[in-house]
Image (cartoon, rainbow, N blue to C red):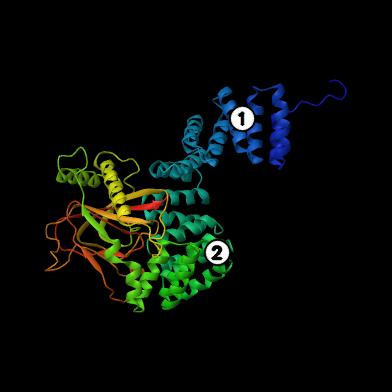
């Protein structure tokens, strides 16, 4: 070797630098080495690993893709490439690469775990569960795999299995913050607020000052029997002036639950000054005004006669009659793969619901989207911007539509709820039991507007507006307006399709 010449760089030396925490140096040296040997798969591999460790994951992916082409049977390249692709959110490519790694070395726990995680993130919980359970069998006692298995079961709708997996992850690693957080969130979603409190308290001890955990804990406290403790959690965060409006709205909810309805109104007014048109703040203020007997102010805000519109829709294009369209829509709802009873839909009793209908709309569901769009356009024309009303004073410039269906069994009903994510909401009735109340003998199965959200535990009997469902009827109303379905005894199903127009 000539005097002063640099010693050749080996891939193993560079990998040792990465393992010593010197990724930046390893990446620089690998880059120089690749200029002399650009097709060396070992150098490309180490360069990719070094770039990833140095925070330059996309550069690392480029190196590993080149290495994979040169050495397609290399297990380490496939595993690391799949892991990096997952870390940047390219889940389809990550899944393909990890499946390739699994074909090279079947049953490897690291591959199965990474593949299961990618499948969870790609919203394929069934396949995720299969791979994560195999990973757990190959690597028993792995808290991270147990955590992701809980997340997969949660996405699949099996909340009991999800709870078991999260609790097992916590048992294996009591300091696993995400497992505590996800378990607390799950228990809150299914209405087990008292059970969620100690889980969220443990998460907060592990992650002091974590805003998401503080919110989840306050939510569980406010929804159980400790709204005053919820305010003690929330108010210091709200006082910083840096908390999102969700914290202040939860504070208004907790104040109402604590019995200080005037404080609830003050909190709502403060929110609306800073964030005009906020759905939850308007909802709680209107309900609170009724609660303290300020009927006139509540009536001006809720404007039941003015803001709730209904009409029989025109037959969509491609259908011979409205009856034919309704029959097609009912058939698609009844066969929708996501239709099930769910503990997550806490306001619905004795009924099934679907997930998002417009994810891949076809047939009558796709036609129904045009029905909604036309109805919303008419509603906007009939309700111009009105600076005198806190909700009509503005409207979102861009919107998106969320849509789902409900099938109620005999005796089924929706308790009073509203739609916080939305701006304008609605419901359509493709099928109504013939025995639904006629308004004279009763109002069974009707939709009612104006009462307080059931979680507020109000005892007030405010003025309400009732509408009789009938096939082909569409109803539009502000998303903040509390509404419920009155239980019905008719044997036949009552089917409704609900939707939200949300700010995009």
Q: Residue at x 60, y 26 (%)?
A: 67
Above/below status of 401 relative to 388: above
Above/below status of 269 relative to 321: below
> Position of 211 compared to 492: left or right?
right
Q: Residue at x 31, y 53 (%)?
A: 381
Instruction: Residue 71: tell me if it is visible.
Output: yes
Above/below status of 338 relative to 289: above
> Position of 380 compared to 317: left or right?
right
On the image, the x and y values in percent for residue 327 come to 17, 45
On the image, the x and y values in percent for residue 6 come to 81, 26
On the image, the x and y values in percent for residue 446 come to 20, 63
Mark 1: few, some, or many residues within 10 Å (few <14, many ≥20)? Answer: many
Q: Which mark is residue 63?
A: 1
Residue at the right extreme, as displayed: 3
Q: Which mark is residue 89?
A: none
Closer to the camera in the image, 206 or 352 = 352
Residue at the top extreme, as displayed: 2
> Position of 489 compared to 54: left or right?
left
Mark 2: few, some, or many residues within 10 Å (few <14, many ≥20)? Answer: many
Q: Which mark is residue 204?
A: 2
C-alpha span from label 1 to label 2: 40 Å
Closer to the camera in the image, 329 or 283 = 283
Give the quadrant of residue 87.
top right
On the image, the x and y values in percent for residue 56 come to 63, 38
**Count of number-bearing discs:** 2
Task: Tell me the element at label 2.
Answer: helix
Q: Residue at x 70, y 34 (%)?
A: 27
Whichever of callouts 1 and 2 sits on the residue coming sooner in the sequence is 1
Q: Residue at x 46, y 74 (%)?
A: 266
């Amino acid at each position: 070797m000539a005097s002063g010449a640099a010693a050749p760089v080996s891939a193993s030396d560079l990998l040792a630098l990465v393992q010593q925490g010197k990724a930046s140096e390893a990446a620089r040296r690998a880059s120089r080495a690749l200029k002399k040997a650009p097709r060396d798969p070992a150098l490309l591999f180490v360069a990719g690993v070094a770039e990833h460790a140095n925070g330059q994951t996309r550069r690392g992916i480029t190196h590993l893709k080149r290495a994979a082409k040169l050495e397609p049977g290399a297990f380490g390249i496939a595993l690391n490439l799949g892991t990096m692709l997952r870390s940047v959110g390219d889940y389809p490519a990550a899944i393909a690469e990890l499946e390739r790694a699994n074909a090279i070395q079947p049953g490897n726990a690291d591959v199965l775990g990474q593949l299961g995680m990618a499948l969870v993130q790609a919203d394929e919980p069934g396949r995720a569960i299969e791979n994560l359970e195999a990973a757990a069998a190959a690597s028993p006692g792995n808290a991270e795999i147990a955590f992701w298995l809980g997340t997969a079961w949660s996405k699949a709708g099996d909340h009991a299995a999800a709870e078991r997996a999260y609790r097992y992850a916590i048992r294996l690693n009591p300091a696993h913050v995400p497992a505590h957080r996800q378990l607390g969130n799950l228990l809150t979603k299914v209405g087990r607020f008292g059970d969620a409190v100690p889980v969220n308290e443990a998460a907060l001890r592990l992650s002091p000052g974590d805003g998401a955990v503080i919110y989840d804990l306050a939510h569980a406290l406010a929804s159980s029997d400790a709204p005053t403790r919820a305010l003690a959690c929330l108010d210091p965060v709200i006082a910083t002036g840096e908390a999102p409006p969700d914290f202040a709205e939860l504070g208004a909810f907790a104040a109402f639950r604590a019995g200080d309805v005037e404080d609830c109104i003050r909190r709502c007014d403060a929110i609306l000054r800073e964030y005009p048109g906020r759905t939850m703040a308007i909802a709680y203020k209107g309900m609170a005004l009724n609660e303290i007997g300020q009927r006139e102010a509540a009536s001006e805000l809720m404007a039941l006669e003015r803001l709730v519109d209904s009409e029989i829709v025109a037959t969509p294009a491609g259908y011979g009659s409205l009856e034919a369209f309704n029959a097609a829509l009912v058939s698609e709802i009844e066969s929708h793969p996501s239709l099930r009873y769910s503990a997550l839909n806490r306001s619905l009793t004795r009924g099934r619901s679907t997930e998002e209908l417009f994810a891949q709309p076809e047939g009558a569901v796709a036609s129904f989207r045009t029905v909604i769009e036309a109805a919303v356009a008419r509603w906007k024309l009939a309700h111009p911007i009105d600076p005198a009303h806190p909700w009509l004073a503005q409207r979102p410039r861009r919107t998106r539509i969320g849509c789902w269906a409900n099938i109620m069994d005999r005796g089924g009903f929706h308790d009073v709820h509203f739609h916080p994510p939305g701006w304008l909401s609605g419901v359509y009735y493709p099928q109504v039991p013939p025995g639904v109340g006629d308004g004279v003998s009763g109002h069974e199965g009707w939709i009612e507007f104006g009462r307080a959200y059931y979680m507020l535990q109000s005892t007030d009997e405010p003025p309400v507006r009732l509408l009789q469902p009938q096939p082909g009827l569409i109803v539009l109303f502000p998303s903040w307006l509390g509404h419920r379905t009155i239980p019905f005894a008719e044997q036949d199903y009552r089917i409704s399709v609900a939707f939200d127009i949300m700010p995009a």
